Image: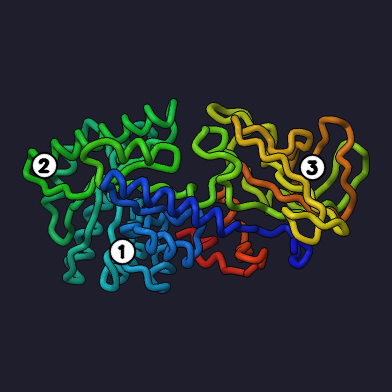
Amino acid sequence: MYFEIDTPSLIVDMNKVKRNIRNMAEYARSLQCGLRPHIKTHKISGLAKLQLEYGAVGITCAKLTEAEVMADEGITDIFVAYPVIGAKKINRAISLAKRIRLIVGVDSEEGALALSEAAQREKITLEVRMEVDIGLRRTGVPCEKAVAFGRWLNGLPGISLTGIYGFRGLIGTAENSGRQEGEILCRIADKLRAKGIDIRDVSGGSTPTGKYVAMVKGITEIRPGTYVFNDMMQVKSNTASIDDCAAFVLVTVVSVPYDDYVVIDGGSKAFSTDVPLKSPPYFFNGYGSVVAKISSGVASQKCPGYHCTWNENTGGGVNADEDLVFKALYEEHGIIESRSGKTGLKPGDRLLIIPNHICPTVNLYNHAYFLEEGNKLREVSVIARGKLY
């Protein structure tokens, strides 16, 4: 099975994907909180539709191009959680808003005025949410300015301020970070309502924090993304176990110069390098975790038709195979070292590796292979990859 396709390739275990989607949907439903998953992780229209089938209220995108692709695939409720700046982007947003329910993020006077002018010109009302900086110090209106900005924004013609949102990331523990995120957003929403502004949607949460954000009374929606696949970041933060990880990069051993390391055909063009290896709360031993060694000729229950050894260590985020460390990356080469001094691998053997950060890793691939019932691999287009604007 794993020798039927070329490498490096992105492999997606659909049984695990469906389990992850179902679990998050059921959790949000149990708290009567809307789920609007971020599709920047998978960028695949079929998975977005699957999330909607399981109960998501809509989807979240980072870029207008992602939203346009998903709208072309029939998805009609999309939130672009990013400032829409520039005449070309604004014109595209207006065009898209005529086709579907589109919500866009706003965090500046310049952006809001441009959206207002374009919407009036096209005689439509554009739905917007104000982004609030709730601790990450990235985009968003500072908390102390949020009420004043919201009152001004609410008075602009051509746009309708229906909600607020924020992204805090993982600051401290997931529980504390999530609860603080939810509480800050709800306090600001209440202050805006006290000024007569009809704030209907209060949106927050990521994969590690979303469950705790949803517990806060007043939160109407969470936007996790990575949960659909999970990765070693989620394992490291104790958000998921290795058994919850559903996406892998399949690579081939191309060179074995010495006993203690091998060279694979997956480098920085096959694995994301955006997460520093040694920074809190993540201290990685390498660029991903090896979870399977596959060589031809010996049957195995885990990998039918091939010899495949697994070490499914679900605790603490250490490498699944404790001996093999994904030590270094070049453009086209990856280096796997053995702690014991002997990898036991030969040219032509294959490895399955869970990346540290799956979202930008997926963006490197034109297609993925879905592992489905009967151990069949189906090629699927990563239709929204590479969308930069």
> How far across and down, in percent of the image, does residue 381 sit?
57, 68
What is the quadrant of residue 54 in the picture?
A: bottom left
Left or right of residue 340: residue 280: left
Residue found at the far right of this picture? 258
> How far across and down, in percent of the image, does residue 147 sit?
16, 37
Residue drawn 67% across the image and 64% down it: 375
Quarter of the figure that contains the N terminus: bottom right
Quarter of the figure that contains the C terminus: bottom left
What is the quadrant of residue 93 in the picture?
A: bottom left
Left or right of residue 374: residue 37: left
Compared with 377, 226 (above or below) is above
Residue of label 2:
193
Residue drawn 73% across the image and 44% down it: 310
Q: Which amino acid type corresponds to the residue marked 1 in the rendered image?
A: Asp
Element assignment for label 2: helix
> How far across and down, in percent of the image, does residue 273 sit?
63, 43
Labelled pair 2, 1 in contact (Cβ < 8 Å): no
Identify the disc placed on residue 335. Answer: 3
First in sequence: mark 2 vs mark 1: 1
Residue of label 1:
77
Left or right of residue 289: residue 116: left
